[in-house]
Image (cartoon, helix red, strand yellow):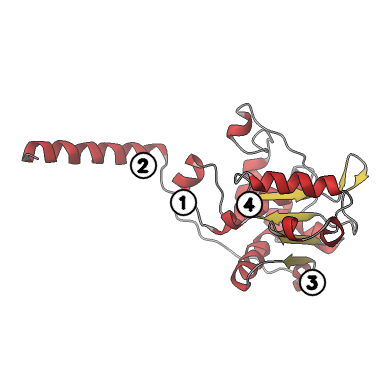
């Protein structure tokens, strides 16, 4: 390869990188303030089926969700806040693999069709999380009144901003917030791009809640 060709190739790489940065600028430095919360709230969040490191990561993320800043954003959108749900009746966060290992009774679900539906959604490899609300259209969906939030392994992979946009993937904190929005009473509301985006893309308060709960 000639020197001229090398410089042309280098220029092409620089141009491509510049375009990526322009399309996906780096996030500004953010000072994260962890609020002090009532320790009793964490007792209302049960985490089942995860390895210790994963379990600790979920609990650490949930501290942000149980704070007043996140809760106020939920309430402003007309949803039950994570703190309200944790206080009564509680929140159960389970690994998605349990949909394959447990029967409907062990999962605490009212209907076998629910287990089959969520198992099928995780089998596609696209779902990072899924939520069975306590009630849906007046029907009781869980046996103990607690919502079930199922989390897939892919939620722990730590996606960058670029990857999250290109591959439609979220990091663990955002996956939990997304599922808590469903648990708090918001049914799916896809945007105009439908399956190309997530199932809450048409929910007007989505971005406000996601930002408040980080």
List the residue tagged with mark 4. 175
Q: Quadrant of the N terminus?
A: top left
Q: Residue at x 11, y 36 (%)?
A: 5
**Does the CB distance between marks 3 and 2 fall below 8 Å?**
no
Pointer 4: residues within 10 angstroms few (<14), some, or many (20+)? Answer: many
Tag 1's secondary structure?
A: loop
Give how far across and how far down residue 69 sits, in percent: 68, 55
The answer to which image quadrant residue 14 occupies is: top left
**Counting residues from the N terminus, which is met first, the one under dot 4 or under dot 3?**
3
Q: Quadrant of residue 145?
A: bottom right
Which residue is drawn at the image coordinates 51% and 60% (left, top)?
31
In the picture, measured across the screen, residue 106 lies left or right of residue 16, that is right
Identify the disc placed on residue 40. Answer: 3
Instruction: Determine the residue positioned at 85% across, 49% down.
Output: 112
Residue at the extreme top: 192
Q: Are marks 3 and 1 in contact (CB under 8 Å)?
A: no
Q: Mark 1 points at which residue?
A: 160
Pick whichever of labels 2 and 1 is earlier in the sequence.
2
How many callouts does the rendering have? 4
Q: Mark 2 points at which residue?
A: 21
What is the CA distance from the residue labelled 3 to the residue labelled 2?
44 Å
Label 2: how many Cα within 10 Å (few below 14, some 14–19, many 20+): few
Q: Distance between the residues labelled 1 and 4?
A: 14 Å
* Nearer to me, 195 or 99: 99
127 lies above or below 33? above
Secondary structure of the residue carrying numbered label 2:
helix
Q: Nearer the viewer, mark 2 or mark 1?
A: 1
Q: Mark 4 against mark 3, which lies toward the viewer?
A: 4
Label whose residue precedes the other's in the sequence (3 or 2): 2
Nearer to us: label 4 or label 2: 4
Tell me whether the residue at label 4 lies in contact with that at label 3, contact meaning CB atoms closer than 8 angstroms. no
Q: In which quarter of the image is the C terminus?
A: bottom right
């Amino acid at each position: 390869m000639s020197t001229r060709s090398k410089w042309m190739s280098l220029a092409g790489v620089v141009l491509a990188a510049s375009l990526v940065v322009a399309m996906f600028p780096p996030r500004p430095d953010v000072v994260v303030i962890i609020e002090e919360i009532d320790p009793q709230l964490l007792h209302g969040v049960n985490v089942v089926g995860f390895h210790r490191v994963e379990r600790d990561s979920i609990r650490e993320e949930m501290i942000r969700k149980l704070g007043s800043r996140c809760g106020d954003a939920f309430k402003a959108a007309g949803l039950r806040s994570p703190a309200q749900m944790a206080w009564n009746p509680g929140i159960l966060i389970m690994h998605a693999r349990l949909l394959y290992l447990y029967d409907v009774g062990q999962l605490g679900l009212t209907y076998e069709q629910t287990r089959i539906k969520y198992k099928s959604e995780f089998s596609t490899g696209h779902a990072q999380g899924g939520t069975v609300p306590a009630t849906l259209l007046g029907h009781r969906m869980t046996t103990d009144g607690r919502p079930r939030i199922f989390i897939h392994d892919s939620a722990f992979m730590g996606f960058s901003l670029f990857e999250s946009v290109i591959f439609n993937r979220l990091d663990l904190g955002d996956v939990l917030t997304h599922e808590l929005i469903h648990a708090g009473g918001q049914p799916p509301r896809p945007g105009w791009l439908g399956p190309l985006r997530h199932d809450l893309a048409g929910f007007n308060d989505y971005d406000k809640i996601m930002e408040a709960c980080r």
